[in-house]
Image: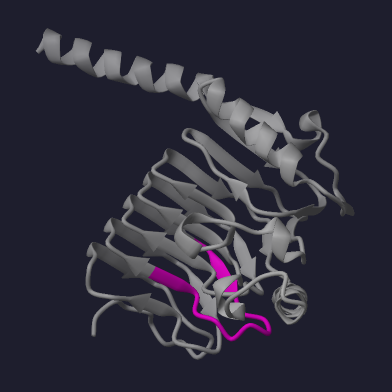
Amino acid sequence: MNRNKLWVGLIGLLAFVTSLSAKDYQAVMFGIKSDGVTLNTRSIQRAVDYISEQGGGRLVFYVGRYLTGSVELKSNVTIRIEEGAVLVASPSVYDLKGPDGCNALFYAVKQKNIGIGGKGIIEGRSAAVRASIEDQLQKGHIQGAVADYEPALVCLEGCKEVKIEQLTLQDAGRTAEVYKDCRNVTVDKVVVHGGTSGQKAVSVSGCDGLEMTDCYFDVEAEPLQTDGTSRRLSFMNCVTPDGKKVSCEK
């Protein structure tokens, strides 16, 4: 009995120490501007890299509009977007990238313990991005189709222990959230507004353990896309504007 109590005490102490080690870093510390004009991609990426190298923590954005291109998430880093903060996609096709053709504003490959949370907004500016893509295609500066370049808002591949919560994701150029071959993903209280893009809300493939709770999907297309390659998918109280429940069941 005493040994069991000792183990419980040690586990509690470890959890407490771990919580203390998770540090908050304000975006302004890295020269990130909230004026809606300054392109912050390099500053945000530098912040994410630094926090990951220091063992992890949260990069916190407060009230303002933060213009950015694609940012690669790293292990043990959480992006915290507080209420009143909006992370806005750069309209230039050259500022957007991601894994295996999945351009996204936030992307990660084979990272762990990552997250995006807060009561703020990630805005894709689909019409402006599409106009940039079409312009560069017409001029012959890039090759392919518009869909090859349109970005998601979040695209994660081969990641594990992921938490996305309380965000509003709006006006994505393609499916707002894309999860490929991920493990143990939790999505809670996320709102997706399709805007002018007409895209799906969520795409899931090859995942093991994905739970979505209390999410709201306001998109023109069917909100969820799955290909039958995932297991342990759970959608609880996830609805569309007409009250239809979202489910992975065929």
Task: Describe the colour scheme in one phrase.
Answer: one colour
Q: Residue furthest front?
A: 140
Residue 210 coordinates in the image, percent (x, y): 32, 58
Q: Position of residue 149 (x, y in %)?
A: 60, 70
Q: Position of residue 49 (x, y in %)?
A: 60, 31
- Horizontally, residue 134 falls left or right of residue 24, namely right
* Residue 201 forms part of the magenta stretch: yes
- Quarter of the image where one finds residue 171: bottom right
How far across and down, in percent of the image, does residue 126 sit? 69, 75
Residue range corresponding to the magenta coloring:
189-203
Seen from the viewer's position, the closer of residues 12 and 152 is: 152
The tally of labels here is 0
Point 53% across, 27% down: residue: 56
Residue in the image at 44% along x and 21% along y? 18
Residue 246: which quarter of the image? Answer: bottom left
Query: What residue is shown at x 48% (from left), y 69% (from top)?
Result: 215
